[in-house]
Structures are given as C-alpha cells and as structure tokens.
Amino acid sequence: MKRDEDKILTKLDVADINVCFDEIRKEINEISIRMTSLGFEFINKMGGDLISEKNKRFMNIRNSIQYRLSSILFHFTLLLDIQMSFQDRLDENPFDKEESIKYLILGGEQQYALFDSIVFHIVSLFDYLACLISYSCSGKYESKLKWNSLIKTSFDFNSYLSNSRLKEILQKWNNEFVDTLYNHRSDIIHYNMDFGNTGLYIDPIKNKVYLEIEAPYRFVKKFRELKNISKENKIMINYSVEWFIKKSLLATKDIINGISLLMDTNRKVPKEKEVFIFRKPTK
C-alpha cells in the first residue's frame, strides 16, 4: 500500500483519550465479572462439586484470563503516561531543536514498544481462551491448547464444537481479526520491528510543539479495515490501539457467551444437582 505523496491526508486520532480509556476500563471490568460468573456455571454444569481439582484448574485458567485483561489495561495506561511525560518535556522548551528530536526518537520507540506489548498480551489472551474452551467444553478436561489448534478443531465435523454456536463465533473472529493479529505478532517477534511515521507538529497559536506518532505501518497494512481507512487518513497510534483493544474485548465477550451456551449443551451435571441455585430477588 503506497500513499499518494501529493495527497493531503486527514489525521485520524482518538477524539477524547480520557473517554476512550474509561470505556476500555469499563469493558474489561465487565468481562472480568462475567468470567467470575462463568466459574459458577462450570461448577453447576460440568464440575458438580463445590471443591475439586477440576474446579481448581478451571479457576486457574479463568484467573489467567483476568490477569491478561488487567495487563492490557496496565500497558495502555503506560502508553498514555509516556505520551503525557514526553509532552511535558517538550513544553519546557518547545523550540529547542536538539531536545525535540531526541524526544521524538525516544517517545516514538517507547510508544511502539508498548504497542507491541499490548499485542502480545492480547494474543496470549486468545490462547488462554482456547485453553478454557478445551478444558470446560471438550469433556476431556484438557487444558493446554493454542488458539490455532482450537480453530482446526472447530472445522472437525466430529468434534465437540460441531453444530455449536461457539464454533461459529470462533471461526468468525478468527477470520475477521485474530488470525491476522497472530500473524502480526509472529512477524514482529521473529523478523523485524514495525514502526510508523513520526514527526513534530508546531502550533504557532498556542506556541506548542506536539509529537505525532502514527500507527505501525505493517500493522495497518495487514488489517483490511485499517488499510482502507489509511487511504484517506493518517492513522495515529492511539486510534489503532483503541481499535484493536476494543475488537479484542468484543471478541472475548462473544466467546465467553459461546462457552456458556456450549457448557449448557454438554453439561455433565443435571440441573437438579447443581451446587449453586440463583433466584431473582424479591420485591
């Protein structure tokens, strides 16, 4: 994908980074709560006992997923903190050319490092979800399965995923998002780094200089949606981070709902023998 050098592109960034952060934090908290309730569902539908080794292993995987979600938010927070830190440094002496260039180089490198870290945590999140699905739904209580192996299983007409809503969810998100994210992760781990354009923007009215860090080039190129957007826009790093974190969280919510449905279909514990009984509160 090559840009027309004479074409003026619109800068595409997050409108309000504080609103963006609050939305992501809220989504992660909601998923974490949903994961806790999924633990009760596993005991009721698959485990059958309040305390057991089966439950313990399930909770370990569930806790690992919650840890990855927290790590995503933590690294997003670090990214925003670094942006504010470098802006503060620029504001001290905005027109010192030597210092500005130094901050441009360091600020860009550190932001791309955190971008990569968020990618790594999200890919790990999907591997953990694959482990949870294998353990809770296959009937074999196998807890070591990578995402790509789970997707292969979903195409097996004789597997526990066949004819399930979860199978459709997994294949949909793999085709639309996760497989491309995995390929990008492999690319930056094994071959070479991925940076975008960086520059300094001078606002003469406010007498300020700003760092402008665009999304990593190959990352944008790999995703059709971002690639199309980039034909008319300069995609900034925060826009791309918001885009792929929210995609990941939406996929995670869909997958959790699919796990719940499949555990209900493949339940090992009759409803009358469920450990936990939930009733609607009386008025």
Image (tube, rainbow, N blue to C red):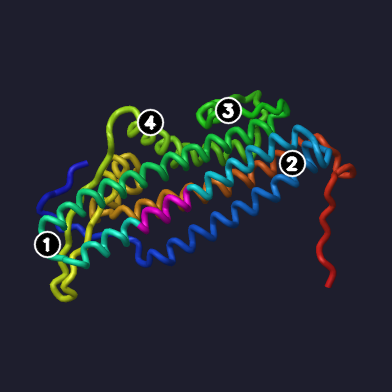
Q: Amino acid at mark 4?
A: Ser
Would residue 80 be counted in the magenta stretch?
yes
Of mark 2 and mark 3, the one earlier in the sequence is: 2
User: Looking at the image, is 238 positioned above or below residue 127?
Assistant: below
Within 10 Å of disc 1 (Cα), the crowding (few <14, some 14-19, many 20+) is: few
Within 10 Å of disc 2 (Cα), the crowding (few <14, some 14-19, many 20+) is: many
Q: Residue at x 53, y 34 (%)?
A: 127
SS state under label 1? loop
Within 10 Å of disc 4 (Cα), the crowding (few <14, some 14-19, many 20+) is: few
Q: Position of residue 208 (x, y in %)?
A: 18, 69
Residue 133: quarter of image: top right
Is residue 239 left or right of 6 when viewed as pictured?
right
Cα distance between the residues tagged 2 and 4: 33 Å
Q: Position of residue 189 (x, y in %)?
A: 35, 31
Residue 145's disc is 3
Residue 186's disc is 4
Would residue 173 be counted in the magenta stretch?
no
